Image (cartoon, rainbow, N blue to C red):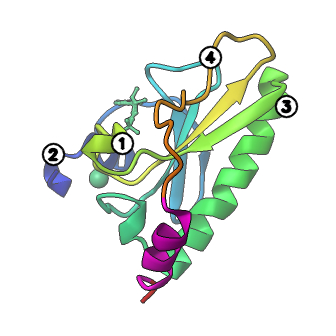
């Protein structure tokens, strides 16, 4: 998605309203409009990047520093039992907004959500997969 049409860029610029909860020079956090639980917050770099994989080291540091701060505040504010921090990267992973963002989701005992079901029953070739991943650090 182009920067001009990006709804999160518009939130950064104040052109689209949002329930902002935290802001610094580089990062903005606001409530997800369609929350999984009350307090579900998105933390974004103010600069447009398609996803987390496109951020440089400094941007990652700024973003993740803010994510921890936001997670602590969300946990306290909602009295949550736990927090999920997640990112959907790419359409196949469920990404629908192509401006990098981190989900901070308060979780409660017995809130009815489950983790991913393992439908993949066969044991993979761990040796081969680990080798392929190790070869791809650049
Ligand atoms: P995803 O790209 O799947 O990681 O999720 C994007 C998230 O952005 C969804 O949880 C949406 O509910 C949320 N969202 C989309 N538009 C807005 C908006 N204008 N304000 C706040 N949250 C939004
Ligand atoms: Zn954007």
Mark 1 / mark 4, whichever is N-terminal? 1
Q: Nearer the viewer, residue 131 or 101?
A: 131
Question: Which disc number belongs to residue 120?
Answer: none
Question: Horizontally, is 115 left or right of 77 in the view?
Answer: left
- Which region shows up in magenta? 125-136
Judge: label 4 CB < 8 Å from ligand 1: no
Q: Distance of mark 4 from mark 3, alpha carbons? A: 20 Å
- Around disc 4, counting alpha carbons within 10 Å, would you say few (fewer than 14), some (14 to 19), or many (20 or more)? few
Quadrant (top left, top right, bottom left, bottom right) of the C terminus: bottom left
Q: Nearer the viewer, residue 128 or 48?
A: 128
In this rendering, which labeled residue sits more in front, label 4 or label 3? Answer: 4
Residue appearing at x 46%, y 37% in the figure: 120
In this rendering, which labeled residue sits more in front, label 1 or label 3? Answer: 1
Residue that mark 3 sits on: 76
Residue that mark 1 sits on: 93
Pointer 1 with pointer 4, Cβ within 8 A: no
Q: Distance of mark 1 from mark 4, alpha carbons? A: 18 Å
- Around disc 3, counting alpha carbons within 10 Å, would you say few (fewer than 14), some (14 to 19), or many (20 or more)? few
Mark 1 / mark 3, whichever is N-terminal? 3
Residue that mark 2 sits on: 5
User: In the image, is residue 38 above or below residue 88?
Assistant: above
Pointer 2 with pointer 3, Cβ within 8 A: no
Residue 107, horizontal then vertical, whole percent: 72, 24
Question: Horizontally, is 67 left or right of 44 in the view?
Answer: right
Pointer 4 with pointer 2, Cβ within 8 A: no
Mark 2 / mark 3, whichever is N-terminal? 2
């Amino acid at each position: 998605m182009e920067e001009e049409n990006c709804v999160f860029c518009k939130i950064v610029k104040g052109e689209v309203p949002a329930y902002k909860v935290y802001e610094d020079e580089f990062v903005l956090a606001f409530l997800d409009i369609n929350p999984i639980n009350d307090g579900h917050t998105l933390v974004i770099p103010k600069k447009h990047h398609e996803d987390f994989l496109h951020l440089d080291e400094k941007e990652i540091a700024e973003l993740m520093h803010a994510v921890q701060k936001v997670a602590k505040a969300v946990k306290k504010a909602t009295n949550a039992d736990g927090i999920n921090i997640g990112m959907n990267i790419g359409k196949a992973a469920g990404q629908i907004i192509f401006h990098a963002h981190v989900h901070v989701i308060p979780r409660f005992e017995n809130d009815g959500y489950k983790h991913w079901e393992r439908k993949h029953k066969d044991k993979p070739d761990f040796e081969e997969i680990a080798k392929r991943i190790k070869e791809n650090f650049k």
